[in-house]
Amino acid sequence: MKKSEQYILFGIGVIIIFLGIFSFLYMERRLSPSFHVKPSNSPTSISYIIIHVAGDVKRPGVYRLPIGARVYEAIDRAGGSLPDADMDSLNLARVLKDGEKIFVPKRALAQTSLKSADNRLDINTMDKESLMRFPGIGEKLAERIIKYREAHGPFRDIDELKNVSGIGDKKLKNIKDYLNSSQKK
Protein backbone atom coordinates (compact mmCIF):
# COMPACT_ATOMS: atom_id res chain seq x y z
CA MET A 1 0.00 0.00 0.00
CA LYS A 2 1.29 3.38 -0.94
CA LYS A 3 1.85 6.19 1.50
CA SER A 4 -0.88 8.34 -0.08
CA GLU A 5 -3.38 5.50 0.31
CA GLN A 6 -2.38 5.14 3.94
CA TYR A 7 -3.01 8.86 4.54
CA ILE A 8 -6.41 8.61 2.89
CA LEU A 9 -7.37 5.58 5.01
CA PHE A 10 -6.06 7.32 8.15
CA GLY A 11 -8.10 10.45 7.29
CA ILE A 12 -11.23 8.38 6.69
CA GLY A 13 -10.69 6.60 10.03
CA VAL A 14 -10.29 9.92 11.86
CA ILE A 15 -13.48 11.23 10.23
CA ILE A 16 -15.38 8.06 11.21
CA ILE A 17 -14.16 8.39 14.81
CA PHE A 18 -15.18 12.08 14.97
CA LEU A 19 -18.58 11.27 13.46
CA GLY A 20 -19.03 8.48 16.02
CA ILE A 21 -18.12 10.76 18.94
CA PHE A 22 -20.29 13.59 17.57
CA SER A 23 -23.32 11.32 17.07
CA PHE A 24 -22.84 9.82 20.56
CA LEU A 25 -22.74 13.28 22.16
CA TYR A 26 -25.67 14.45 20.07
CA MET A 27 -27.82 11.45 21.05
CA GLU A 28 -26.92 11.79 24.74
CA ARG A 29 -27.90 15.44 24.67
CA ARG A 30 -31.23 14.59 23.06
CA LEU A 31 -31.97 11.93 25.65
CA SER A 32 -30.94 13.93 28.71
CA PRO A 33 -33.27 16.58 30.19
CA SER A 34 -32.90 20.02 28.73
CA PHE A 35 -33.42 21.76 32.07
CA HIS A 36 -31.19 22.14 35.05
CA VAL A 37 -32.48 21.62 38.57
CA LYS A 38 -31.28 24.25 40.98
CA PRO A 39 -30.54 23.30 44.56
CA SER A 40 -33.54 23.68 46.88
CA ASN A 41 -31.75 26.21 49.06
CA SER A 42 -31.42 28.59 46.13
CA PRO A 43 -33.78 31.57 46.57
CA THR A 44 -34.69 31.56 42.89
CA SER A 45 -35.45 27.84 42.65
CA ILE A 46 -39.11 28.26 43.72
CA SER A 47 -41.41 30.70 41.99
CA TYR A 48 -44.52 29.91 44.03
CA ILE A 49 -45.79 29.63 47.60
CA ILE A 50 -48.16 27.15 49.23
CA ILE A 51 -50.90 28.60 51.43
CA HIS A 52 -53.92 27.24 53.32
CA VAL A 53 -57.26 29.05 52.96
CA ALA A 54 -59.92 28.20 55.56
CA GLY A 55 -63.07 29.61 57.08
CA ASP A 56 -65.98 31.25 55.26
CA VAL A 57 -64.88 30.52 51.66
CA LYS A 58 -66.47 28.33 48.97
CA ARG A 59 -63.59 25.82 48.64
CA PRO A 60 -61.30 25.77 51.70
CA GLY A 61 -58.02 24.03 51.03
CA VAL A 62 -54.32 24.25 50.22
CA TYR A 63 -53.37 26.29 47.17
CA ARG A 64 -50.27 27.14 45.15
CA LEU A 65 -49.87 30.84 44.27
CA PRO A 66 -47.07 32.87 42.71
CA ILE A 67 -44.58 34.58 45.00
CA GLY A 68 -45.89 38.04 45.79
CA ALA A 69 -49.55 36.97 45.76
CA ARG A 70 -51.89 38.83 48.07
CA VAL A 71 -54.66 37.77 50.46
CA TYR A 72 -57.46 38.64 48.00
CA GLU A 73 -55.87 36.34 45.40
CA ALA A 74 -55.82 33.44 47.86
CA ILE A 75 -59.51 33.96 48.63
CA ASP A 76 -60.30 34.12 44.91
CA ARG A 77 -58.40 30.86 44.35
CA ALA A 78 -60.57 29.29 47.08
CA GLY A 79 -63.70 30.19 45.11
CA GLY A 80 -64.38 33.50 46.83
CA SER A 81 -65.99 34.31 50.13
CA LEU A 82 -69.38 33.17 51.35
CA PRO A 83 -72.17 35.70 52.02
CA ASP A 84 -71.57 35.87 55.79
CA ALA A 85 -67.79 36.37 55.49
CA ASP A 86 -66.31 39.31 57.35
CA MET A 87 -64.01 40.62 54.61
CA ASP A 88 -63.43 43.90 56.45
CA SER A 89 -61.54 42.05 59.18
CA LEU A 90 -58.81 41.05 56.70
CA ASN A 91 -56.10 43.08 55.01
CA LEU A 92 -56.82 41.93 51.47
CA ALA A 93 -53.77 43.73 50.08
CA ARG A 94 -51.22 42.00 52.35
CA VAL A 95 -48.51 39.96 50.59
CA LEU A 96 -48.62 36.27 51.50
CA LYS A 97 -45.77 34.12 52.83
CA ASP A 98 -45.09 30.47 52.07
CA GLY A 99 -46.79 28.09 54.51
CA GLU A 100 -49.27 30.68 55.73
CA LYS A 101 -52.89 30.03 56.71
CA ILE A 102 -55.56 32.56 55.77
CA PHE A 103 -58.73 32.28 57.88
CA VAL A 104 -61.81 34.11 56.61
CA PRO A 105 -64.13 34.63 59.61
CA LYS A 106 -67.89 35.01 59.59
CA ARG A 107 -69.35 38.42 60.37
CA ALA A 108 -70.03 38.99 64.04
CA LEU A 109 -73.14 37.22 65.21
CA ALA A 110 -74.89 40.45 66.17
CA GLN A 111 -74.63 41.68 62.54
CA THR A 112 -76.19 38.60 60.95
CA SER A 113 -78.80 37.04 63.24
CA LEU A 114 -82.18 37.74 64.77
CA LYS A 115 -82.02 40.55 67.33
CA SER A 116 -84.23 41.33 70.29
CA ALA A 117 -85.35 44.74 71.52
CA ASP A 118 -82.06 45.47 73.34
CA ASN A 119 -80.09 44.64 70.15
CA ARG A 120 -79.05 41.23 71.51
CA LEU A 121 -79.99 37.83 70.17
CA ASP A 122 -82.99 35.88 71.36
CA ILE A 123 -82.02 32.22 71.67
CA ASN A 124 -85.70 31.27 71.88
CA THR A 125 -86.48 32.49 68.36
CA MET A 126 -83.33 31.48 66.48
CA ASP A 127 -83.39 28.76 63.84
CA LYS A 128 -80.64 26.17 63.31
CA GLU A 129 -78.62 28.28 60.85
CA SER A 130 -78.67 31.29 63.20
CA LEU A 131 -77.58 29.16 66.15
CA MET A 132 -74.68 27.79 64.08
CA ARG A 133 -73.27 31.32 63.84
CA PHE A 134 -72.37 31.21 67.53
CA PRO A 135 -68.71 30.41 68.22
CA GLY A 136 -68.36 26.66 68.76
CA ILE A 137 -71.91 25.67 67.82
CA GLY A 138 -72.16 23.36 64.84
CA GLU A 139 -75.10 21.67 63.20
CA LYS A 140 -75.57 18.86 65.74
CA LEU A 141 -75.39 21.15 68.77
CA ALA A 142 -77.80 23.63 67.17
CA GLU A 143 -80.25 20.75 66.63
CA ARG A 144 -79.90 19.70 70.29
CA ILE A 145 -80.62 23.28 71.44
CA ILE A 146 -83.80 23.39 69.34
CA LYS A 147 -84.92 19.93 70.57
CA TYR A 148 -84.33 20.98 74.18
CA ARG A 149 -86.28 24.21 73.61
CA GLU A 150 -89.17 22.26 72.02
CA ALA A 151 -89.26 19.73 74.87
CA HIS A 152 -88.87 22.17 77.80
CA GLY A 153 -90.23 25.48 76.46
CA PRO A 154 -88.28 28.73 76.03
CA PHE A 155 -85.04 29.29 77.90
CA ARG A 156 -85.76 31.50 80.93
CA ASP A 157 -82.14 31.84 81.93
CA ILE A 158 -78.90 31.59 79.96
CA ASP A 159 -77.51 29.04 82.42
CA GLU A 160 -80.32 26.71 81.37
CA LEU A 161 -78.34 26.17 78.14
CA LYS A 162 -75.91 24.04 80.17
CA ASN A 163 -78.69 21.41 80.33
CA VAL A 164 -78.13 20.84 76.58
CA SER A 165 -75.61 18.10 75.96
CA GLY A 166 -72.39 19.63 74.64
CA ILE A 167 -72.68 23.03 76.31
CA GLY A 168 -70.46 23.62 79.30
CA ASP A 169 -69.15 26.70 81.09
CA LYS A 170 -66.58 27.56 78.41
CA LYS A 171 -68.99 27.34 75.47
CA LEU A 172 -71.63 29.26 77.42
CA LYS A 173 -69.12 32.02 78.17
CA ASN A 174 -68.31 32.32 74.43
CA ILE A 175 -71.93 33.02 73.48
CA LYS A 176 -73.27 34.81 76.59
CA ASP A 177 -72.51 38.37 75.46
CA TYR A 178 -74.54 37.91 72.29
CA LEU A 179 -77.73 36.95 74.08
CA ASN A 180 -80.74 38.98 75.20
CA SER A 181 -80.34 40.35 78.74
CA SER A 182 -83.63 38.73 79.83
CA GLN A 183 -81.89 35.39 79.26
CA LYS A 184 -78.61 36.36 80.97
CA LYS A 185 -79.82 36.29 84.61
Image (cartoon, helix red, strand yellow):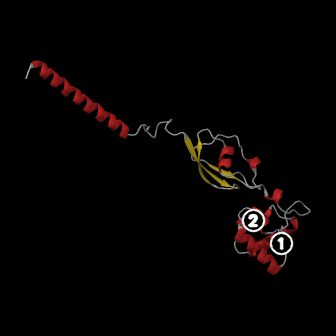
In the rendered structure, which amino acid carries the disc numbered 1? Asp
Query: Depth check: 33 or 12 in front?
Result: 12
In the rendered structure, which amino acid carries the disc numbered 2? Met
Q: Which residue is mark 2?
A: 132
CA separation, marks 1 and 2?
20 Å
Q: Indicate which disc, 1 or 2, sits on the residue closer to the N terminus.
A: 2
The residue lying at 77 percent from left, 77 percent from top is: 147
The residue most toward the left is 1
Residue 114, position as x, y percentages in the image:
85, 63
Residue 95, position as x, y percentages in the image:
64, 40
Residue 138, position as x, y percentages in the image:
71, 66
Say which quarter of the image contains residue 20.
top left
The residue lying at 58 percent from left, 39 percent from top is: 67
Residue 167 appears in the picture as rendered: no
Compared with 162, 174 (above or below) is above
Residue 119 appears in the picture as rendered: yes
Indicate left or right for 134 with 49 as reference.
right
Say few, some or many: other residues with alpha carbon within 10 Å of mark 1 (under 14 / 14 to 19 / 20 or more).
few
Indicate left or right for 87 with 115 as reference.
left
Q: Secondary structure at mark 1?
A: loop
